[in-house]
Amino acid sequence: MFDILALISTLIIITSLRKLTVIFPSLIGCMLRAKENINLEASVKHSIDRNICAVTMVIPFCLAAYRFGIYDITPLQSLDDSLRLAAYIGIFVLYVLLRLALAKMVRPGRLNKKTQSAADRISFTYFIIMTLAILGTGSVMAFCGMEPGLIKNAIIWISAAIYALMLLRKFQIFNSSCSVFAGFLYLCALEILPTGILIIPALIF
C-alpha cells in the first residue's frame, strides 16, 4: 500500500510542480511577512495554485509521517503496516474535519472578507512549506544513514517551528482587524484547540 501511494503521490507532485515553482517565492514571502499572506490570498491565480498544491501534499505528508513514525503512538504500533498507514491518513482527515468544524463555529466578525479568507487559508500555505521541509529533511538524513530516532526528532522540531511561525502570522492577521485579546482567543479556538487534541494522545501514549 505504501509503495502504491508513494507512486501516486510522486506522479501528482510532478504534475503540480510548475504551480509549486510559480508560487514558491510567495510562500517564502509569507514566512517573512504577515502582509504577504493577505497579498497571496488577493491573487486569484496564486491562491488557487496554492490550494491545489496543498491538496497534492496530503498523501506525501501522510506517507512521510508514517515512514518516519512522527505520530507512532502505542495503539498504532500493534497494527500491521497497511492498517497503520490507513490510521495515519484517518487521523489526518479527522484533524482537518475538526479544524473545518471549528472554523464554521468561530467566525471573527470584525475581519473583512479578504482578511478572513487569508486567516482561514494560511494553514494551506504553511502545510506546503512543512511538507516540503519534512520530505527534504527526512530524505537527506535517511540517505546519510542517520538513526531513525534522530530523524524523527529533527522532523518534529522543524514541524513545530514552522507551525509556531504560522501561529504568529495568523495572530498578526487577526490583530490587524481586532484587539490583541480577541485575536488570541480566535487563535486558541481555531488552532491551539484542535492541535492540542491531536498532540495529547501522543503525550499520553
Image: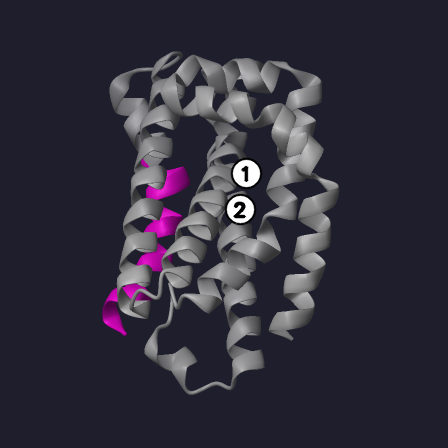
The amino acid on which the numbered mark 2 sits, given as a three-letter code, is Ala
Judge left or right: residue 90 versus residue 150. Answer: right
Q: Mark 2 — residue?
A: 101
Where's the N terminus, which quadrant?
A: bottom right
Is 170 positioned to the left or the right of 160 in the image? right
Determine if residue 105 is in view.
Answer: no
Q: Residue at x 55, y 52 (%)?
A: 97
Q: Is residue 155 magenta?
A: no
Residue at label 1? Answer: 104
Nearer to the camera, 88 or 140: 140
Q: x and y percent of residue 38 in the render?
A: 51, 16
| Contact? badges 1 and 2 (CB < 8 Å) | yes
Secondary structure state at the residue bearing disc 1: helix
Is residue 192 shown above or below 24? below
201 sits to left or right of 132: left
Q: How many residues crowd around disc 2 within 10 Å: few (fewer than 14), some, or many (20 or more)?
A: few
Rendering quarter of residue 162: top left
Q: On screen, 189 above or below 120?
A: below
SS class, disc 2: helix
Q: Is residue 200 magenta?
A: yes
Neighbor class of circle 1 (other Cα within 10 Å; few <14, some 14-19, many 20+) is few
Which residues are the magenta region? 188-205
Q: Is residue 116 visible?
A: yes
Residue lying farthest front?
144
Could you say where residue 12 lies in the image, as x and y percent from the top left? 71, 50
Q: How many marks?
A: 2
Q: Nearer the viewer, residue 124 or 68?
A: 68
Magenta stretch, main secondary structure class = helix
User: Please, is residue 101 above or below residue 31 in the view?
Assistant: below
**Residue 44 occupies quadrant:** top right
Q: Which amino acid does the dot numbered 1 rest on?
A: Lys
**Displayed quadrant of residue 110:** top left
